[in-house]
Amino acid sequence: MLFVLAASEAVAGVEADIEASVVFASLNDTAIPGDEGTRISLVDDLSISPAPAFRLRLGYLAGQLVWPPLAASRPTAPPSRPKMPRACP
């Protein structure tokens, strides 16, 4: 298995992922009904050879999206105190 992690800026565009692997049966035993019934082994009873498997995923990235309730804003200074009028002497 190969794991790749990458970080990049979000830009708009088309993206595609292609995966390929081999599928094979190694263990496929069951009993019908439950644990007490007739034992069946699909690997031993059937002729199953390895087969290729492919997956293609296409998508479109719409660019950077921000949901307004989660948007961060720059902190502002607290409002200044209002000036009170002077009392007449």
Image (spheres, rainbow, N blue to C red):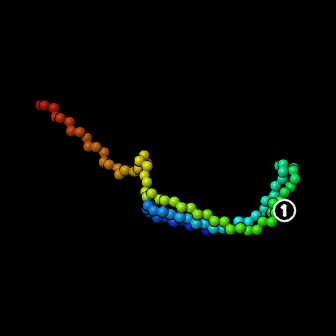
Asked if 33 appears above or below 44 in the picture, the reply is above
Residue depicted at x 17% and y 35% = 85
The answer to whether residue 69 is left or right of residue 44 is left
Mark 1 neighbour density, 10 Å: few (under 14) some (14–19) many (20 or more): few
Taking depth in this image into account, of 74 and 22 the one nearest to the observer is: 22
| Three-letter amino acid code of the residue under disc 1 | Asp
**The N terminus lies in which quarter of the figure?**
bottom right
The answer to whether residue 72 is left or right of residue 89 is right
Asked if 26 appears above or below 71 in the picture, the reply is below
* Residue at numbered disc 1: 45
Taking depth in this image into account, of 10 and 77 the one nearest to the observer is: 10
Residue depicted at x 58% and y 63% = 56
Taking depth in this image into account, of 69 and 30 the one nearest to the observer is: 30
Q: Position of residue 25 (x, y in %)?
A: 76, 64
**The C terminus lies in which quarter of the figure?**
top left
Q: Quadrant of residue 62?
A: bottom left
Q: Position of residue 74 (x, y in %)?
A: 35, 51
All told, the count of numbered labels is 1
Asked if 73 appears above or below 60 in the picture, the reply is above
Residue depicted at x 71% and y 65% = 23
Could you tell me which secondary element the residue under label 1 belongs to? helix
Q: Position of residue 69 (x, y in %)?
A: 42, 46
Residue depicted at x 41% and y 47% = 68
Q: Position of residue 21 (x, y in %)?
A: 66, 68
The answer to whether residue 20 is left or right of residue 86 is right
Q: Quadrant of residue 3?
A: bottom right
Taking depth in this image into account, of 83 and 34 the one nearest to the observer is: 34
The answer to whether residue 27 is left or right of residue 68 is right
